[in-house]
Amino acid sequence: MSGPVFRTTRWRTGYRVDEVDDFLADVLPRLTDRPDPALAERIVQARFATVHFGAGYDMGDVDTYLDELVRRAGGPPTPGA
Protein backbone atom coordinates (compact mmCIF):
# COMPACT_ATOMS: atom_id res chain seq x y z
CA MET A 1 0.00 0.00 0.00
CA SER A 2 1.54 3.30 -1.00
CA GLY A 3 1.06 6.42 1.05
CA PRO A 4 -0.69 9.62 0.10
CA VAL A 5 0.83 12.59 -1.65
CA PHE A 6 0.24 15.78 0.31
CA ARG A 7 0.56 19.33 -0.93
CA THR A 8 3.56 21.09 0.56
CA THR A 9 3.77 24.50 2.16
CA ARG A 10 6.62 26.94 2.16
CA TRP A 11 5.42 30.30 3.40
CA ARG A 12 2.80 29.13 5.87
CA THR A 13 2.73 26.67 8.72
CA GLY A 14 2.86 22.98 7.83
CA TYR A 15 3.63 19.68 9.49
CA ARG A 16 7.22 18.39 9.46
CA VAL A 17 7.51 16.08 6.50
CA ASP A 18 9.78 13.53 8.19
CA GLU A 19 7.51 13.14 11.22
CA VAL A 20 4.40 12.57 9.11
CA ASP A 21 6.22 10.17 6.79
CA ASP A 22 7.65 8.17 9.72
CA PHE A 23 4.26 7.96 11.43
CA LEU A 24 2.49 6.79 8.27
CA ALA A 25 5.23 4.27 7.50
CA ASP A 26 4.49 2.70 10.88
CA VAL A 27 0.68 2.96 10.82
CA LEU A 28 -0.28 2.09 7.24
CA PRO A 29 1.00 -1.52 7.33
CA ARG A 30 -1.05 -2.09 10.52
CA LEU A 31 -4.40 -1.29 8.87
CA THR A 32 -6.46 -4.39 8.22
CA ASP A 33 -10.07 -5.19 7.42
CA ARG A 34 -10.73 -5.70 11.13
CA PRO A 35 -11.52 -2.86 13.52
CA ASP A 36 -8.57 -1.90 15.68
CA PRO A 37 -9.65 0.64 18.32
CA ALA A 38 -6.10 0.93 19.71
CA LEU A 39 -4.74 1.86 16.29
CA ALA A 40 -7.60 4.30 15.73
CA GLU A 41 -6.80 5.96 19.08
CA ARG A 42 -3.10 6.13 18.20
CA ILE A 43 -3.97 7.93 14.97
CA VAL A 44 -6.29 10.34 16.81
CA GLN A 45 -3.54 11.12 19.32
CA ALA A 46 -0.86 11.75 16.66
CA ARG A 47 0.85 15.14 16.91
CA PHE A 48 3.49 16.54 14.60
CA ALA A 49 5.93 19.41 14.94
CA THR A 50 5.34 22.31 12.60
CA VAL A 51 7.54 24.31 10.29
CA HIS A 52 6.85 27.94 9.48
CA PHE A 53 9.08 28.91 6.57
CA GLY A 54 10.53 25.64 5.31
CA ALA A 55 8.81 22.91 3.36
CA GLY A 56 6.08 21.14 5.29
CA TYR A 57 2.96 19.15 4.55
CA ASP A 58 -0.33 21.00 4.24
CA MET A 59 -1.93 20.56 7.65
CA GLY A 60 -5.48 20.28 6.31
CA ASP A 61 -4.49 17.56 3.85
CA VAL A 62 -2.78 15.53 6.58
CA ASP A 63 -5.62 16.00 9.08
CA THR A 64 -8.22 14.92 6.51
CA TYR A 65 -6.18 11.83 5.65
CA LEU A 66 -5.76 10.93 9.32
CA ASP A 67 -9.53 11.22 9.80
CA GLU A 68 -9.95 8.72 6.94
CA LEU A 69 -7.43 6.36 8.56
CA VAL A 70 -9.30 6.54 11.87
CA ARG A 71 -12.51 5.48 10.11
CA ARG A 72 -10.65 2.68 8.29
CA ALA A 73 -9.25 1.48 11.61
CA GLY A 74 -12.78 1.27 12.95
CA GLY A 75 -12.71 4.28 15.19
CA PRO A 76 -15.18 7.13 15.44
CA PRO A 77 -14.71 10.26 13.37
CA THR A 78 -12.47 12.76 15.11
CA PRO A 79 -14.17 15.84 16.63
CA GLY A 80 -14.86 18.53 14.06
CA ALA A 81 -14.75 16.11 11.12
Image: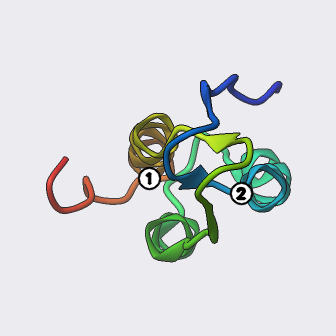
Residue 54: image location, x then y, percent: 73, 48
Q: Which residue is mark 2?
A: 16
Q: Quadrant of residue 19?
A: bottom right
**Residue at figure coordinates x 53%, y 38% from the top left:** 58
**Cβ–Cβ below 8 Å for labels 1 and 2?**
no
Query: Please, which residue is most extreme toward the left here?
Result: 80
Which of discs 1 and 2 lies nearer the camera? The answer is: 2
| Quadrant where the N terminus is found in the figure | top right
Residue 2 against residue 57 in the figure, above or below? above
Q: Is residue 76 left or right of residue 9?
A: left
Q: Between residues 43 and 37, which one lies in front from this camera angle?
A: 43
Q: Quadrant of residue 22?
A: bottom right
Which amino acid does the dot numbered 1 rest on?
A: Val
Judged from the image, the secondary structure of the residue bearing numbered disc 1 is helix
Judged from the image, the secondary structure of the residue bearing numbered disc 2 is loop
Which amino acid does the dot numbered 2 rest on?
A: Arg
- For label 2, count other residues whose C-alpha is less than 10 Å away and answer few (under 14), some (14-19) or many (20+): many
- For label 1, count other residues whose C-alpha is less than 10 Å away and answer few (under 14), some (14-19) or many (20+): many
Q: Which mark is residue 70?
A: 1
**Residue at figure coordinates x 65%, y 50% from the top left:** 53
Q: Is residue 33 left or right of residue 21?
A: left
Give the image's coloring scheme. rainbow
